[in-house]
Amino acid sequence: MEAAVSIRGVHKTYDAGAVAVSALNGVDLDVRPGEGVMLMGPSGSGKTTLLSIMGCILRPTRGSVRIRGREITVLSERELPRIRLRHVGFVFQSFNLFRALTAEENVALPLELAGKAGREARVRARSLLDAVGLTKRAQARPGEMSGGEKQRVAIARALIGEPDIILADEPTAALDSVAGRGVLGVLRELSLAQGRAVVIVSHDNRASAFVDRVVYLEDGRIVGPEGT
Amino acid sequence: MPLLARRNLLYDKARFAVTLAGIVFAIVLVVIQLGLFIGFTVATSAVIDHSGADLWIAAKGVQYFEVAFPLSERKLYLALGTPGIVSADKLIVRFTAWRRPDGAETNVVVVGFNPATGAGGPWNLIAGSLRDLEIADTVVVDEFYRQGLGVRELGEQVEINNRRARVVGLTRGIRSFTTTPFVFTSFKNALNYTSTAEDQTMYVLARTGPGAAPEEVKARLRERLGDVDVFTRQEFSERTRHYWLFTTGAGIALLVAALVGLMVGCVVVAQTIYATTVDHLREFGTLKAIGASNSYVYSVIVQQAVWSAVAGYGLGMGAAFGVIRLSRGAGAAILVPWQLTAAIFGLTLLMCVTASLVSVHRVTRLDPAEVFRE
Ligand SMILES: Nc1ncnc2c1ncn2[C@@H]1O[C@H](COP(=O)(O)OP(=O)(O)O)[C@@H](O)[C@H]1O
Ligand SMILES: [Mg+2]
């Protein structure tokens, strides 16, 4: 089966003033549709950098990034936002919801960006809020929600555009363990049901129960084990 | 308007109120300062601008309307005999003393014109009649100076230069640049009020015929009349304004105040909008990360700025006109022509959009990868 995202020989070097920081040193990684991958590794090992590159937010210095078989490193800066909108869903550590929008509007926002605002967008946002267990919170604003609730809204927002891959960088770091497990459960369940690939960065070993395999990163290299 | 722009504006009401307050403050400041400046500028030359005369003839060396030097009335007849001139009138303008009914004295500028043609005379009469100026010892003053001149009602008896004078008319909005009021009267009365010799005048106001170019007639007059200055209405108006605005410190002070007001206003508006946008910088970063195009981000930010500008302008103009209304009796000649309101609208919009675009620049330069960094 064609990989949702395929990384080959990716290097990333940051220009940090006078010194160049080498964040990734030849990473290969395939994630299949519906597959859940957990990315672990010490701080500074390149996890966020890798996630950003997979999400078309950052360009690799060298190497190939394919989403659904399409090479995206050759695309122009102007084309990348559309690729992100169509193919990638993001879940952030600090939720990054829009504080002036209701839960429903936050979830529907990617559809508005795609020019598909309207009744149908609201209906889909509603059903996703149902799916993440927030039926009654559709009209709440982020300021009125708990961390766990906010992250569920963020998951619904990540799913609404029917992306090929969902990228979550430490999605439970700001939550207590009960809320964290709830969030991971919802994320895994929905992405599996919809056949989306998920890559989760986490420090928490217990989170590995929610994925198919764990990938360890150290000094910008994958050090295994591949698969569980 | 994108949903996000609308929601952002209305969600944080305190923020929006601060933004609007900043814009309103700036607009009131600018309207009042520029309105004062325009009001005084227009006041300095108002009698000239309303004179209807195409050409003003004066003794050589006149610098501004209020102070001219006597001129033989022979110049009037010479002017009337000049090709291109269809009519001409004498006009006296001179400082003199006014004694109120209670005996107090104050300075006035007597303007003696020909009531038959009205050239150099008052306008905007709100009480009485200009025709009554044909009667001996009658004057017209502006309602604004009633208190200072001790005029309780129409028909009030006062003394000018120790001669009787009766107030037969009141005007509205004819103010001088200085605190000295204009007192309009017939040329004949003015001779007495100003102790001017009967065969003298201060100005000759001439009208040119329909086919005659004022500039050509002006050159002809200069040649025929000899040692006089001849100005077109526009030239004399500008000369007078220039004198009051630039030769006296008062005008420069007003101009500087107006320019400083304008600068402060622009800075306040720009700063206010910039702060509002920067307040949402993180959200705009998220917006980019999840796939909004730069143009979408632009449209959200710019529309937030435009609607802030429009709302702030509306409130600001309302507040400014409220202040102007309150100050109407207080001696300030604030004039706000529609061109000024339009220019301020344009400027407000420009400042808001520019300030928001400067912050957009910060957003579009924003590395979307920042969203993953805490
Ligand atoms: N924008 C940047 N500029 C310079 N160096 C960076 C930048 N982002 C990350 N790095 C460096 O790259 C390495 C990998 O960082 P990161 O991908 O954030 O690791 P992790 O998420 O595993 O903690 C680190 O050494 C970090 O300091
Ligand atoms: Mg990280």
Image (tube, rainbow, N blue to C red):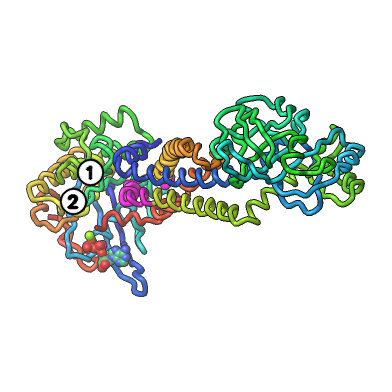
Q: Is residue B291 magenta?
A: yes
| Left or right of residue B209: residue B30 | left
Res A154 label: 1
Secondary structure mainly formed by the magenta segment: helix
Q: Is B25 in front, or is B370?
A: B25
Q: Is mark 2 within 8 Å of ligand 2?
A: no
Q: Is mark 1 within 8 Å of ligand 2?
A: no
Residue B149 screen position, x and y as percent? 58, 38
Three-letter amino acid code at the position of disc 1 = Ala
Mark 1 and mark 2 in contact? Answer it, CB < 8 Å.
yes
As measured in the structure, the alpha-carbon distance from the residue carrying label 1 to the one carrying label 2 is: 10 Å
Q: Secondary structure at mark 2?
A: loop
The residue carrying mark 2 is A171
Residue A223 screen position, x and y as percent? 18, 65
The structure residue drawn at horizontal position 30% and vertical position 46%, both measured from the top left corner, is A88
Chain designation of label 1: A
Residue B217 screen position, x and y as percent? 87, 42
In the image, which residues are magenta? B275-296
The structure residue drawn at horizontal position 16% and vertical position 56%, both measured from the top left corner, is A202
Could you say which quadrant of the image residue A218 lies in? bottom left
